[in-house]
Amino acid sequence: MRYLETRKARIEIVPMIDIMFFLLVFFVMAMLKMIPNSGIATQLPHSSTAVEVPHPKVLVSLLKDGSIMIDGKPGTLPDLSHQLASGDAVQTAVTIASDQGTSVQNLMAVMDACRTVGVTQIALAAKVQH
């Protein structure tokens, strides 16, 4: 008589959860490939004695026309000073990525804006030339 008993239908949840996690990972990976990388095209000066420095807390890009980008966003020297003064300036590491055709005066203006608020860790970005 055991063969004639009706059995309750069971829905297995574990395989369904596995499939949902797989789909989630698949779509996350697909979306990461769709996000465009953004940045500014600059030609860094070359140096044969450049060394690797730690990752900066603030990256300042100095373009040929004298404009600056603070962590990828357009800004001015007062904006840079204000942003650096709002944090712990002594512990802040600033890297200046200056375009090859930038004048030294513009570079000095950015360095002065950093040092005025108390930043002591300033590095200049360069391409290593072998």
Image (spheres, helix red, strand yellow):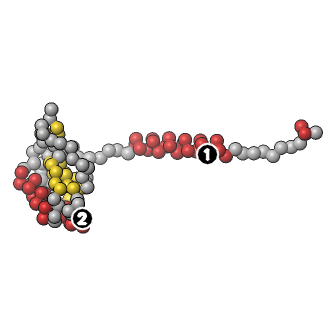
Classify the position of the N terminus by image quarter: top right
Earlier residue among tags 1 and 2: 1
In the rendered image, is residue 68 in sight? no
Judged from this view, the residue extending furthest toward the top is 130
In the rendered image, is residue 22 in sight? yes
**Residue drawn where x is 10% and y is 48% of the image:** 102
**Residue drawn where x is 26% and y is 49% of the image:** 55
Residue 26 % position (x, y): 50, 41
Classify the position of the C terminus by image quarter: top left
Residue 31 % position (x, y): 44, 44
To which residue does mark 2 refer?
Answer: 88
**Residue drawn where x is 75% and y is 45% of the image:** 10
Q: Tag 2: residue type?
A: Asp
To which residue does mark 1 refer?
Answer: 17
Quadrant of the rendered image containing residue 84: bottom left
CA neighbours of label 2 inside 10 A, class few (<14), some (14 to 19), many (20+): few
**Residue drawn where x is 32% and y is 44% of the image:** 37
Disc 1 to disc 2: CB gap under 8 Å:
no
Q: Give me the C-alpha separation between circle 1 and circle 2.
A: 46 Å
Label at residue 119: none
| Pick the front one: 73 or 17 | 17
Residue 35 % position (x, y): 38, 45
* Whether residue 75 is situated above or below residue 25 in the rendered picture: below
Q: Secondary structure at mark 1?
A: helix
